[in-house]
Image: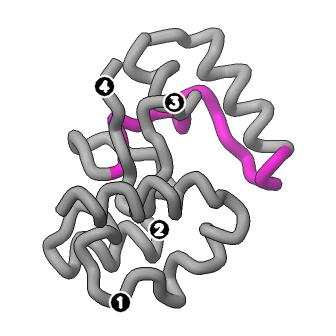
Amino acid sequence: MRETISACGLDCSNCECRIAYLGGDEARKEEIAQNWSIRYQASLSRADIKCQGCMEGNVHFNWCERCPIRSCVIQKGYQTCAECSAFPCQHNSGLYEQVPAAREAIERIKKEL
């Protein structure tokens, strides 16, 4: 599977939600919904576990539609934060503290531009 990077640098190609959705794995979607409901203190069902990738397709996990990083990137007409001269910024700095690999991915992409 080719690498699919989200607006912020998360690796969508390894996202369990995306993998289960694209694979049509209903049992795995149910398991993810239960786990994520506990982890994120939400009420998720198997039907909520759907995503084609942050910046791909038209099916996204419900958080993706509300994500301030994704919204910023789309408003600016970019594919990722790597294209932005303000990187890193107040939108993504908190995420990068929690997920350094996302920032590393954006920095790698930025070097390739």
Q: CA distance from mark 1 to mark 4?
A: 28 Å
Which label sits in the foreground, 2 or 1? Answer: 1
**Mark closest to the chain's N terminus, 2 or 1:** 2
Disc 1 element: loop
* Residue 47 sits inside the magenta stretch: yes
Percent position of residue 26, x then y: 56, 12
Q: CA distance from mark 2 to mark 3?
A: 19 Å
Disc 4 element: loop
Where does the magenta region start and end? 39-54
Report the residue marked by disc 3.
14
Residue neighbourhood size for the residue with mark 4, other residues' Cα within 10 Å, grouped as few (<14), some (14–19), many (≥20): few
Residue 23 visible (yes or no): yes
Report the residue marked by disc 4.
2
Which label sits in the foreground, 2 or 3? Answer: 3
Disc 2 element: loop
**Mark closest to the chain's N terminus, 2 or 4:** 4
Q: Amino acid at mark 3?
A: Asn
Report the number of discs.
4
Magenta residues: mostly which secondary structure? Answer: loop
> Which residue is most to the front?
111
Q: Residue at x 42, y 31 (%)?
A: 13
2 vs 80: above or below: above
Disc 3 element: helix
- Horizontal relation, residue 64 to residue 33: left or right: left
Residue neighbourhood size for the residue with mark 2, other residues' Cα within 10 Å, grouped as few (<14), some (14–19), many (≥20): some
Q: CA distance from mark 3 to mark 1?
A: 27 Å
Q: Give residue 30's quadrant in the image.
A: top right
